[in-house]
Image (cartoon, rainbow, N blue to C red):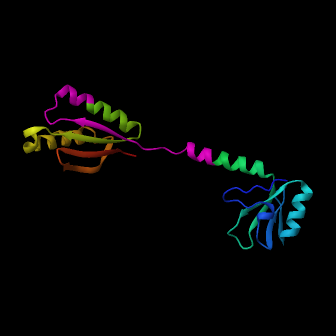
Amino acid sequence: MSEQQNDEVCVNEKITAKQVRLIDANNENRGIVSLREALALAEEEGLDLIEISPQANPPVCKILDFGKYRYEQQKRKAEAKKNQKVVEIKELKLRPMIDTHDYEVKVKQAKKFLEQGNKVKFTMRFKGRELSANDMGKQVLTKLIEDLENISKVDSEMKLEGRQMTMILSPQK
């Protein structure tokens, strides 16, 4: 009989309640029984008494093999983690005097990133006197919004921070 304790699960003698709502090895509800009686039934079956729902009054305990229970919990966590999609922010750097071909390449990259479900951060970098004519940078970013409007939405508007202007687009659902 295993008397290990997982981080959040009480097993066998680690259970502190006086009475528990017992579910036996066949998944049948045995009702409310004393902890001593529940432990005796688990011992008789050669299994562990595991506290499934400690918040309930009285707590719900089940007669199971603790190793098998822990394995099932890990499997559920792994499955939930596998189904999560991590959204990344991909950054594309631009210049206000960008050539048409270079611009088209950036648009193509942005479309690819957005179709993969990632956000795209556009960074317009200004050098020297270009900063005084930042309306050219705004025009390029506005054109980007127009070219990508069918597959994206603006997450954060254009904002000038020092010598660069940034904007974030996210994919449309």
Q: Is residue 62 above or below residue 81?
A: below
Q: Is residue 69 above or below residue 146?
A: below
Residue 9 occupies quadrant: bottom right
Residue at the spot 86% in from the left edge and 64% down from the top edge: 39
Image coordinates for residue 59, horizontal then vertical, percent? 74, 69
Whether residue 40 sits left or right of residue 15 in the image: it is: right
Residue 108 occupies quadrant: top left
Residue at the spot 24% in from the left edge and 29% down from the top edge: 104
Bounds of the magenta segment: 77-105
Between residues 69 and 153, which one lies in front from this camera angle?
Answer: 69
Residue at the spot 20% in from the left edge and 45% down from the top edge: 165
Q: Is residue 57 above or below residue 88?
A: below
Q: Residue 60 colored magenta?
A: no
Image coordinates for residue 28, horizontal then vertical, percent? 83, 60
Whether residue 71 sits left or right of residue 46 in the image: it is: left
Residue at the spot 79% in from the left edge and 68% down from the top edge: 21
Q: List the single residue furthest toward the right.
A: 44
Residue 37 occupies quadrant: bottom right
Q: Residue 98 colored magenta?
A: yes
